[in-house]
Image: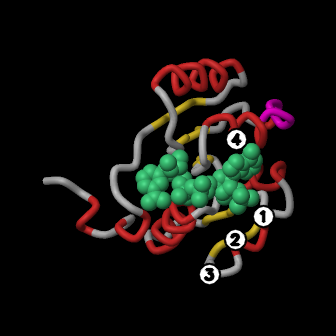
Amino acid sequence: MSDTITIIGLGPMGQAMARAFVDAGHPVTVWNRTRSRADGLTGVTVADSVEGALAAGDIIVLSLTHYDAMYDILGPYRSRLMGKTLVNLSSDTPDRTREAAEWARAQGASFVTGGVMVPAPMIGTDSAYVY
Ligand SMILES: NC(=O)c1ccc[n+]([C@@H]2O[C@H](COP(=O)([O-])OP(=O)(O)OC[C@H]3O[C@@H](n4cnc5c(N)ncnc54)[C@H](OP(=O)(O)O)[C@@H]3O)[C@@H](O)[C@H]2O)c1
């Protein structure tokens, strides 16, 4: 059974991740502040609201300009994060990522972070991995 994935943030990187997760067979729901950025995506469900996006996914992937955007988006819906896994792949400082991990834990969520080291067109390709 595939994990249900929600992607929040549809810049070039979030869009590339959405395509990769769809190609891997996961049910993918997306939400973006500017809804039209989902227009070119196929095989995804576009959520009408942040609440809907959170409800649809067990794993919530965040691909945003910086960590402040995560608080802007999820702050009003803290009560909906219990039991979720937040995977924040946005770029920011180590201190900001540690703060975010504590914030997520305080909401009853698990937190995973990472830095993306390749440009968006390489996501999901063999070239994205160093062997
Ligand atoms: N692109 C790459 O090749 C690349 C490579 C390595 C790492 N990264 C990192 O991956 C992350 C995403 O990259 P990207 O190129 O996709 O970034 P981006 O073009 O800056 O897009 C980021 C997304 O964040 C949203 N956003 C920003 N501030 C927001 C706020 N206050 N409230 C709600 N939404 C907000 C934007 O929504 P709107 O559409 O509504 O503006 C957009 O969908 C960044 O942290 C970047 O440093 C990117």
Q: Does the stretch in magenta take in 58?
A: no
| Magenta range | 75-79
Majority SS type along the magenta span: helix
Q: Amino acid at mark 2?
A: Arg
Under mark 1, the amino acid is: Thr
Is the residue marked by circle 3 packed among few (<14), some (14-19), or many (20+) residues within 10 Å? few
Mark 2 CB within 8 Å of ligand 1: yes
The residue type indicated by label 3 comes to Thr
Q: Is residue 77 magenta?
A: yes
Q: CA separation, marks 3 and 1?
A: 17 Å
Compare marks 2 and 4 and give the one earlier in the sequence. 2
Q: Position of residue 128 (x, y in %)?
A: 28, 61
Per the image, label 2 sits on a secondary structure element best described as: helix
Between discs 3 and 1, the one toward the N terminus: 1
Q: CA distance from mark 1 to mark 2?
A: 6 Å
Relative to 123, 46 lies left or right: right
In this figure, which residue is indicated by the disc labeled 1?
A: 34
On residue 37, which mark appears? 2
Label 1 close to label 2 by CB (< 8 Å): yes
Q: Residue 57 in the image: x percent, y percent?
A: 67, 52
SS for tag 3? loop
Q: Earlier in the sequence, mark 4 or mark 1?
A: 1
Quick check: is the Cβ at mark 1 less than 8 Å away from ligand 1?
yes
Q: Nearer the viewer, residue 44 or 32?
A: 32
Q: Quadrant of residue 9?
A: bottom right
* Residue at 55% across, 31% down: 111
